[in-house]
Amino acid sequence: MDNPRAWSELYEDRRYHWKGPDPAVVAIAARWRELGVRLIHDLGCGAGRHTAFLQTQHFLVVGSDIALPGLAATSALLDDLALPRVLVRSDMGRMPFADGCFDATVATNVLNHGLRADLQAAIDEIHRTLRDGGEVLLTVLNTWDWRCGEGTQLEHNSFQLTEGPETGILHHFFDEEDLRAWLAAFELIDITRVRGVLEIGRMPSERSVHRDAWQVLARRVNT
């Protein structure tokens, strides 16, 4: 699995305390209200932007992360906003939650951090902890992203960065075939390629870098 120490060091840099929710999370909130979703798992909650936003939309949210500084930042944000706090330190491959306990899961920029087998364990855990018909919204990196091929290759399409603020952090990059195989236990509702220029990183040089990701909405179905 990924390196918790590297994540802890990253969260000490407040540039990585992202402000404001991802537009996809804003959009999914309306859908999930219509579907009667109540309890959401914010997997890899980081500094808490989605945990906080979803609570302002009147969902119950459990935030989890492996990095203690991330959980501390989430806790501080929720306190500042006078929002409830249910936070759990957890490895995404071994979650301390009951089968079928969540109505929905959000995992943005989380499920590409690990070797392929670790990521399979994580998506299997999401499947286990979602109720039948529950949905997951996720974003993961694809093989067009600028980081694919950077750093030390650990296995096919998996690289550990060796320069910049993300030094020591492992990234797996999904091509479409791999993505669909990874999500085989789910019904795929939507797959979208999301591209953009990431100004904050400029890693490992001063050039602007091009981020490329898959955005997926999927549903747990009876198997």
Image (cartoon, helix red, strand yellow):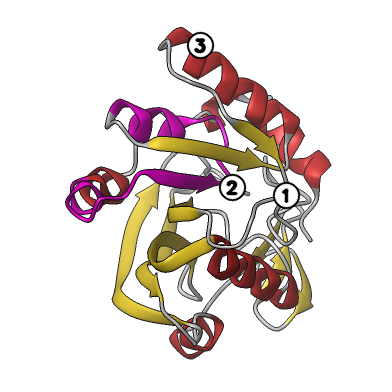
Residue 55 in which image quadrant: top left
Q: Secondary structure at mark 1?
A: loop
What residue did someone put label 2 on? 203
User: From what the image shows, is residue 132 above or below residue 198?
Assistant: below
Q: Nearer the viewer, residue 17 or 37?
A: 37
Is 125 situated left or right of 145 in this image? Answer: right
Circle 3 crowding by C-alpha within 10 Å: few under 14, some 14–19, many from 20? few
Q: Earlier in the sequence, mark 3 or mark 1?
A: 3
Q: Residue sitting at 21 percent across and 49 percent down? A: 27
| C-alpha gap between disc 2 and disc 1 | 7 Å
The answer to which of 180 and 220 lies nearer the viewer is 220
Q: Do the residues under discs 2 and 1 have CB atoms within 8 angstroms?
A: yes
Q: Amino acid at mark 3?
A: Asp
Instruction: Give the labeled residue for mark 1.
Output: 163
**Where is mark 3, residue-wise?**
79
Report crowding for label 2: few under 14, some 14 to 19, many 20 or more residues within 10 A (C-alpha): some
Counting residues from the N terminus, which is met first, the one under dot 2 or under dot 1?
1
Residue bounds of the magenta highlight: 30-56
The answer to which of marks 3 and 2 sits earlier in the sequence is 3
